[in-house]
């Protein structure tokens, strides 16, 4: 299998499984929530989501800047569990 180039997949190791997802969540004054995205070199438009805590912490400066720029609150959240398959492609 050729390398996918996806962040988080290391050497296409068999058995690699995402257990947790971390996301910066933007909350506006009305309480509406959303996952913000930014443009990262080499990755293009990227949501502020990662499967490793260390990776999401690297996005903290971006989240802090966005909170100031858009006058919103940012929360770092962890989504845990086995997840539920909602679609399969190939």
Image (tube, rainbow, N blue to C red):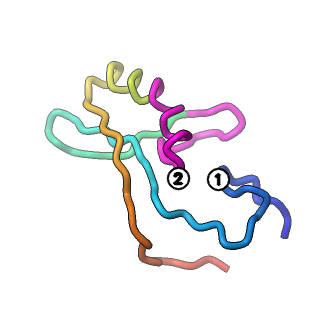
User: In percent of the image, x 26 and y 31: which residue is there?
Assistant: 73
Quadrant in the picture for residue 15? bottom right
- Where, quadrant-wise, is the N terminus in this rendering? bottom right
Mark 2 element type: loop
Picture layout, residue 59 above or below residue 32: above
User: In percent of the image, x 73 and y 56: which residue is there?
Assistant: 10
- Where, quadrant-wise, is the C terminus in this rendering? bottom right
Give the residue at the far right of this rendering: 2
Q: Which residue is mark 2?
A: 51
Magenta-span inclusion, residue 90? no
Which of 39 and 3 lies nearest the eye of the viewer? 3
Asked whether the beta carbons under mark 2 and mark 1 sit within 8 Å of each other, the answer is yes
Q: In the shown orientation, is residue 12 left or right of residue 45?
A: right
Which of 23 and 54 lies nearest the eye of the viewer? 54
**x, y percentage for residue 87?**
51, 78
Magenta-span inclusion, residue 40? yes
The number of numbered discs placed on residues in the rendered structure image is: 2
User: In percent of the image, x 35 and y 41: which residue is there?
Assistant: 76
Q: CA distance from mark 2 to mark 1?
A: 7 Å
**x, y percentage for residue 45?**
58, 40
Which one is earlier in the sequence, the residue at label 2 or at label 1? 1
Mark 2 crowd level (few <14, some 14–19, many ≥20, 10 Å Cα): some
Mark 1 element type: loop
Quadrant in the picture for residue 46? top right
**x, y percentage for residue 70?**
32, 25
Which of 24 and 41 lies nearest the eye of the viewer? 24
**x, y percentage for residue 82?**
44, 73
The range drawn in magenta is 39-62
Q: Which residue is mark 1?
A: 8
Q: In the shown orientation, is residue 35 left or right of residue 40?
A: left
């Amino acid at each position: 299998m050729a390398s996918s180039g996806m962040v988080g997949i290391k050497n296409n190791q068999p058995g690699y499984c995402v257990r947790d997802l971390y996301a910066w969540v933007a909350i506006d004054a009305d309480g509406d929530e959303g996952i913000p995205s930014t443009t990262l070199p080499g990755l293009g438009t990227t949501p502020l989501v990662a499967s490793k805590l260390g990776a999401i912490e690297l996005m903290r400066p971006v989240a802090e800047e966005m909170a100031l720029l858009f006058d919103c609150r940012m929360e770092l959240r962890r989504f845990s569990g086995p997840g539920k398959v909602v679609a399969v492609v190939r």
